[in-house]
Image (spheres, rainbow, N blue to C red):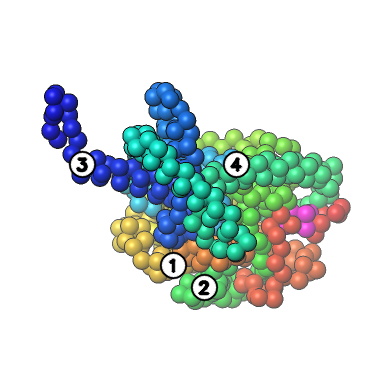
Amino acid sequence: MSTIAGVRVVPVWRRRLLLGGAIAALIALPLIPGVLATGSIADLVRIPVESIVALLVLALIPWRMLRLAVATAFGAFVALAVLLASIDRGYQSALGIHFVPLDWPQLGDAYGVLASAIGAAPATALFAAAVALVVAIGVAGGWGSLHVDAALRQRGDRGRGALAAVTVAWIVMAAVAPPLRIPDPVAAAASATSLGTAVSRAVSALETRARVAREVADDPFRDVPATDLLSALAGKDVLFVFVESYGRVALEGDGISDGVNDVLRRGDQTLAADGFTTRSAWLTSPTFGGVSWLAHATLQTGVWVDSQAVYDLVVRTDRLTLSAAFGRAGWHPVSDVPSNRHPWDVGSSFYRYETMLDATNVGYRGPSFGYARIPDQYTLKHFADHVLAYSDRPVMAEIDLVSSHTPWAPLPELVPWDDVGDGSIYNPQPGRGEQASEVWQDPEAVQRSYGRSVEYALGSVLSFLENVDDPGLVVVMLGDHQPAAIVSGDEAGRDVPVSVIARDPSVIDAIADWNWTTGLRPSDASPVWRMDAFRDRFFAAYGSAG
């Protein structure tokens, strides 16, 4: 850079380089949401209408400070569009659903899962880098618009003519694409589409909430005495055991299902020898890859809870849950959620649990296994020793088994039932198994580790059933959702296995008309119900009023 008469002169090559960078920013940045939506880099070969509009507005403004405000708003608009598109892409990859802005509280849970997979420090660094990148996109977009606007102003009529030509070209290309059935028109509005779609999903979610509110209020079992809903189960301990990420792929996936099906076959033999009878089928979960509480709420309420917004609505109502019905009918309702580390107000206010167990109050003194800190076998052993053995009423419980929660490493191993103790026996196990950072370098390794985690979870349930002497025990064991797409695949469905296990034949006789399959493994011919159908059919099967 040189000076002439005290004025700094920017070399021509540098001015051209800066202008080229500004033009590139105006072209590329607004197109990023389109690339994220389609996964195709070819979507960068477009003309973004957002940049054209920004330049047209800037050209009409004579005041510098107002131009600066407009450029800042444009940069923020593009950054927000990229942010929403990025989150949506992540949701589709991990959960198989689109992100709805009303569900923003879930982002904290997503960060927690990431931290469990790769460690808190790398997760924090990744989060900081993502924030910095979004801010940089916003700054670059604003700077690019100001710089190109300044260059157009310097060129006077030529600059205005160039901008007009680009505008007309965009309009023509946008107009001819539909009649010519051009699938990928050069004229693009990716950022505007990203924000518009987010707004549309939010509006749709609000409409869904209104529909769900009506559905919640229209409950055929609201005024039925609880004892009439559960009369056939009087005096029995009834457990609803959710096995994390236990989806159809666990029974049918290549490289995954062999070990899981072996566990189920051995389980059928052991349970039959111990006098248990089992029936199984499929339930279609409202969620995929995570957000397990949506499935729990759906099963408990008979309402299709498929988003955080719907969940937040439902748990603020007086909708009759399975746990509340059991509590009213004289059972001792218990929740056992070993992944919880903080107070869970909804557990008492909505589900009406009298006892809530979590990571803080089950006396675990063993090592952490990542997200699933407490091994499933310990969870079930503690429950048997400290709840079933001491309750003066029949127990109804929801028990969440989380050893099969992503990242599926490191994994615990089964130990002799009587040796579980305070969990110290697990101390050597995390160090001799694969770590999440190793497993997640290879998708096939992730799938194998997932399969082993389900084998462990199912083995824990079988260990519990083999060692608990409770003639009236009834267990409803089911998955909450399919695992993430890296395991299930991009086109996977949402079916999960469900089994009813009981020693008393009358429990199974009561559901004979369900036509479920004998044993722990549902077949292709087994019924497939939506998960929200379960509550009402359960009440009808085991009650004297349906």
Q: For the residues marked 1 and 4, what is the alpha-carbon distance in whole angstroms? A: 36 Å
* 540 with respect to 138 (left or right): right
**Lower position in the chain sequence, tag 2 or tag 3:** 3
Q: Which residue is mark 4?
A: 199
Is residue 478 at least partly visible in the picture? no
**Lower position in the chain sequence, tag 4 or tag 2:** 4
Which residue, as the protein is rendered here, is positioned at the far right? 545
Q: Amino acid at mark 4?
A: Val
Rendering coords of residue 116 (x, y %): 39, 49
Magenta-drawn stretch contains 535: yes
What SS does tag 1 mark?
Answer: helix
Looking at the rendering, in which quadrant would you find the N terminus?
top left
Magenta-drawn segment: 534-539
Q: Which residue is mark 3?
A: 12
| Quadrant position of residue 12 | top left
Q: For the residues marked 2 and 1, what is the alpha-carbon distance in whole angstroms? A: 9 Å
Rendering coords of residue 258 (x, y %): 49, 76
**Lower position in the chain sequence, tag 1 or tag 3:** 3
Decide: few, some or many residues near mark 2? Use Cα within 10 Å; few <14, some 14-19, many ≥20: some
